[in-house]
Image: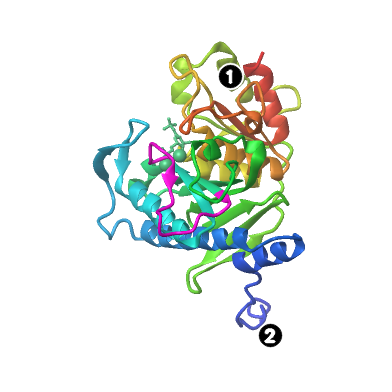
Amino acid sequence: MVDEHLSVGPAGPTFHGQTLEQHLLAMQRKASGATGDFTGLFQQLSLAAKIIASQVSKAGLANILGLTGQVNVQGEEVQKLDIFANNTIVRCVQQGGHVCVMGSEEIAEPIPVPPQYPKGKYVLQFDPLDGSGNIDINASIGTIFSIHRRKTAGNGPGTLEDCLQPGDDIVAAGYVIYGSSNMFVYSAGEGVHGFTFDPAIGEFFLSHENLRIPKRGDCYSVNEGNRHKWEDGVQRWADWIKKPDGERKAYKLRYIGAMVADFHRTLLRGGIFAYPADRKNTSGKLRLLYEASPLAFVCEQAGGAASDGARRIMEIQPTELHQRTPLYIGSPEDVADAVRFVGG
Ligand code: AHG
Ligand code: MN
Ligand code: MN
């Protein structure tokens, strides 16, 4: 007689399914007129993600932890891994010939493509390492990116004008999360797809097809240490959400302090992540072009919402590369609730 506990079937190898590259190629075949440029850019991005993931996972060994002693354009101390991640993305992408200019959190001006490489039709903007305060404590961090079509004519170098485009003009955006597993999550305007990295094979495999965010969650995510600086509406929202109201239970608070990680949980489980404006920082903390609008694009593609308290993040026309914005992002009903308090 077979012991029931043992009859779990043969422990043979399982089929891994579709890689990120295969998924992109399948999409490319569906889009008439696709040149392969877009898939090429993603290949460079996923290579950069693998290199960054490999460094992140051995950060404790590689003497790459800690600060460089420099200060970035935001006036924050720059961590060594931030610079490594920035340089990795720039080096991988500039060689591909798919972009005409890039924009990064770590670099004050638009990043030109060196003269020896061809210029492409896309514009890449990124936060190379988000949540870098978490590096030293072995908590999740990430990379955020967005892709626009170039606005300027011709095939010469791109300019600041190419970078200053609203979220509504994004062609594709996504993030990589370096966590208990590493994932690449992206949308090219046809839903949101998540790929989990198999380190034994060195590929991202489709694990979360067509992700949909719940209409409402049970969790809010905000740095409540800033409460004393918030405007009244934001304080009232945070007071309201943590208490039961009629049918609605009190919301749980979860805050990692790395937006990619807080957003990833919000996308999978529902709820809201917020970084409000306050009396001192009237535009909040997060950057529009390479933090808020790429995640707003992903969130809307998953059925969610993203607002600055008054308008959709995606509608904001940027005027500066490193412009900041307040952000309320997540389940559509939870974002609508926040906007009622904050916008009123
Ligand atoms: P970065 O590491 O790219 O500078 O971003 C940090 C951001 C974001 O990831 C996070 O949500 C937020 O800063 C946390 O800020 P507080 O420490 O002020 O809560
Ligand atoms: Mn960031
Ligand atoms: Mn960063």
Depth-wise, is mark 2 or mark 1 nearer the camera? 1
343 inside magenta stretch: no
Give the magenta part as a residue range: 105-122
Q: CA distance from mark 2 to mark 1?
A: 57 Å
Q: Mark on residue 2? A: 2
Q: In the rendered structure, which amino acid carries the disc numbered 2? A: Val
From the top left corner, tell me how far across and down residue 215 is, in percent: 74, 38
Task: Using a 10 Å C-alpha cutoff, classify the residue at mark 1 as few (fewer than 14 neighbours), some (14 to 19) or many (20 or more).
Answer: few
Q: Secondary structure at mark 2?
A: loop
Is residue 55 left or right of 283 when viewed as pictured?
left
Q: Main secondary structure of the magenta part?
A: loop
Of pointers 2 and 1, the one earlier in the residue sequence: 2
Q: Residue furthest bottom?
A: 1
Task: Using a 10 Å C-alpha cutoff, classify the residue at mark 2 as few (fewer than 14 neighbours), some (14 to 19) or many (20 or more).
Answer: few
Camera-side residue of 323 and 270 = 323
Residue 244 visible (yes or no): no
Q: Which residue lies under the disc numbered 1? A: 239
Image color mode:
rainbow
Image vertical order of residue 157 relative to residue 228, above or below: below
From the top left corner, tell me how far across and down residue 152 is, in percent: 57, 41
Q: CB of residue at label 2: within 8 Å of ligand 1?
A: no
Q: CB of residue at label 1: within 8 Å of ligand 1?
A: no
Q: Quadrant of the C terminus?
A: top right
Which of the four quarters of the rendered structure image does ligand 3 lie in?
Answer: top left
Q: Mark on residue 248? A: none
Q: In the rendered structure, which amino acid carries the disc numbered 1? A: Asp
Residue displayed at 75% across by 59% down: 31
109 inside magenta stretch: yes
